[in-house]
Image (spheres, rainbow, N blue to C red):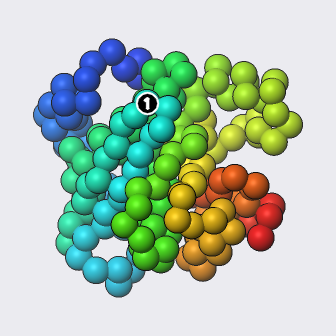
Amino acid sequence: MTFHTEQNVTWSRRSLLGLIGGGMAAALAPAALAAPSVLTGAGDIRRVKLSNPRTGEAVNTVYWVEGEYIPEAKAEIDFILRDWRENLLIDYDLRAVDILAATYRLLETNEPISVVSGYRSPVTNALLRRNSRGVARDSYHTKGMAIDLQMKSRSPSQIRRAAKRLGAGGVGGYRSFTHIDSGPIRSWGRA
């Protein structure tokens, strides 16, 4: 179950965690969120290490332990993936986060993933569409299902190859970043 509720963020990450830890914990119960097969046999934990150079924020968290998602960790991931232009966040699709974590694991690095683009509000997506023909009208970014990423220690083609090995979601290769999403299996762009 994925909630696509857009919220205007006017609080700190810590106060957001307090809010999520209380009321939203029940909504994110593990029974409602089946673990995707992309990480079957991946061990007892799932971790992401993200940085957002536009906001200066970073998160290094275990968000899944022995079959259960951790609501507080998921809230931090949602926060760092928010639309920083509009300061809005969405409940990110856990399949996208799982694909991101599995890609990171295959890259065998300790460097954080640099978020180029996470959630995009309809306003932000329209703005980006006006400035680039590569932005889809009905982008998975507007649904909390896509992440554009880059790393200093790995080229976009290395990241793309790792993501494609998973056989899950969409993988797009661009000159300076890689796109992953939890939509249908497909790939495009640079090798």
Residue shown at the point (63%, 72%) measured from the top left: 158
Residue shown at the point (58%, 32%) measured from the top left: 120
Q: Is residue 65 left or right of residue 190?
A: left
* Residue 91 appears in the picture as rendered: no
> What is the three-letter code of the residue carrying label 1?
Thr
Residue shown at the point (64%, 20%) measured from the top left: 123
Q: Which residue is mark 1?
A: 55
Residue shown at the point (29%, 40%) measured from the top left: 75
Choose top left, top right, bottom left or bottom right for residue 129. top right
* Residue 71: image location, x then y, percent: 23, 47
* Residue 112 appears in the picture as rendered: yes
Choose top left, top right, bottom left or bottom right for residue 69. bottom left
Q: Is residue 77 above or below residue 131?
A: below
Q: Is residue 78 above or below residue 125?
A: below
* Residue 107: image location, x then y, percent: 49, 74
* Residue 104: image location, x then y, percent: 45, 67
Choose top left, top right, bottom left or bottom right for residue 13. top left
